[in-house]
Amino acid sequence: MSDLQGVLEQLAPCMDAPALWLGLSGGLDSMVLLHAVTELRRHSPLPPLKAIHVHHGIHPDADRWVEHCQRECAARQVDLVVHRVTLPSGGNVEELARDARYAVFEQQLGAGDWLLLAHHADDQLETLLFRLMRGTGVRGLAGMPRSRALGQGRLLRPLLDWTRAQLADWARAQELAWIEDPANADPRYARTALRHQLLPYLRQHWPALPDNLLRLAGHAGEANQLLDERAAEDLQALGQPPADPWLACWPSLDMQALGGLSPARQKNLLRYWLHQQGLRLPDQRHLHTLLEQLAAADDSQPRVRIHQGLVHRSSGRLWLLPEQGVPAGQNQPWEAGSSVKLTAGNGWLRCSAGGPLALRAGQWRIGYRQGGEEIRLPGRPTQSLKNLFQSAGIPAWLRPAVPLLYCDERLVSVAGRWHAESALADAGETGFGVIWEPIPD
């Protein structure tokens, strides 16, 4: 890293951003990036720069690291935001800390903002080796992307072309101060052991390994691009939302069309689809389990939990639902004709004047299915709600969330979609309309 021109070239995609956020740990890498960007803005019109430090609370010197970041940012006239997080107990500390960190980053980014992270070529090598040892697929072989979407903005790693040694040489030449996290030398952490034991050994016996691995990552990146293009084509054919307004808001795939794809294309599409919905991709074993369960008998409705989501097969489609499923409704009183947010988080009732329902005196409430409910629609015999839902293709997972409108304990309307004949407004009566808007979590 002999000059700053290369860093400036890497920043080209984000020059029009409303703000640049720099993830600042206070270590060598992030201090190099902080200094480089603040030097560049002396001569180039960069977006406003802010730094963000995540205090994980797992090391006794963490408060001192915050003070270091505050001091260095103040010296460069860079605003610093410090977030303190509490990691859940149990699990892998490195993964928990990373998840907490990225959750903070995603929360902080505004629309169009960019987050700069100081990962370098050695970090990329460690990531590739780590994933290889864990049996990664083609997507994992591509390593860390230089840029990707994150929340309302994007993430950029502008130092991926430089090694840790090059950054260290530049930092010493610039007389930078940085902190050393003892965890980076603790062999109990898998990545640390890889960095200080395995990588030096591999470099000694296979000097060309770093370049070969990075070249492999480039090839894998191109392969992933082709796989994504194929998956996007398949998703265009399989992922068109149902016409039913109650169902269009839930991500779904057509099961019959999905079954017509080869197993390899099914897996590729499912990975792409889940990634597009912002979920962590399942590994090969979990993906295989997902496909096996989804291939169960037609009369079953299998559900498979994945990270932060629930995949449910029902009514001829594969649905992606919130991790805890769709909340069942909760009974609540209601002022007829008024729009209201449903208390269980299962959407809104939107009302309008001049609709088909009669606005009559009585005790109105919003209820939900208990079993055995019936309704007589205009010009039709009385039928059960169960048959009504089945005929309309409403999946079983959504039925407990469908609001039922009652007046004096008589079922008046099913979420504004089906009305009892006796509840329709006669000539001269004031009428109102109702629409239920489900809201995915």
Image (spheres, rainbow, N blue to C red):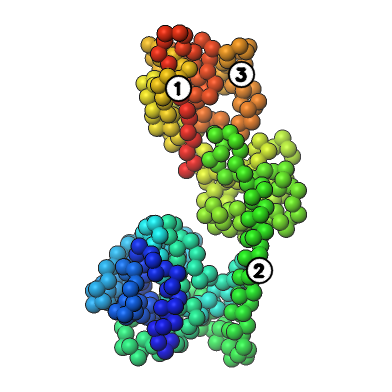
Q: How far apart are marks 1 and 3 (CA)?
A: 23 Å
Please name the residue that numbered disc 2 is placed on.
223
In this rendering, is residue 356 above or below 339? above
Residue at left offset 45%, top offset 35%:
347
- Residues at marks 1 and 2 touching, judged by CB atoms closer than 8 Å: no
Task: Report crowding for label 1: few under 14, some 14 to 19, many 20 or more residues within 10 A (C-alpha).
Answer: some
Please name the residue that numbered disc 1 is placed on.
433
Kindly identify the amino acid type of the residue bearing the numbered disc 3: Ser
In terms of secondary structure, where does tag 1 sit?
strand
In terms of secondary structure, where does tag 3 sit?
strand
Q: Distance between the residues labelled 3 and 2?
A: 53 Å
In terms of secondary structure, where does tag 2 sit?
helix
Residue at left offset 66%, top offset 35%:
315
Q: Earlier in the sequence, mark 3 or mark 2?
A: 2
In the image: residue 156, left or right of residue 295:
left
Kindly identify the amino acid type of the residue bearing the numbered disc 2: Ala
Task: Report crowding for label 3: few under 14, some 14 to 19, many 20 or more residues within 10 A (C-alpha).
Answer: few
- Residues at marks 3 and 2 touching, judged by CB atoms closer than 8 Å: no
Please name the residue that numbered disc 3 is placed on.
384
* Residue 65 in the image, given as x and y percentages of width and height: 31, 73
Camera-side mark, 1 or 3: 1
- Residue 63: quadrant of the picture: bottom left
In the image: residue 92, left or right of residue 87:
right
In this rendering, is residue 342 above or below 4? above
In this rendering, is residue 383 above or below 345? above
In this rendering, is residue 383 above or below 57? above
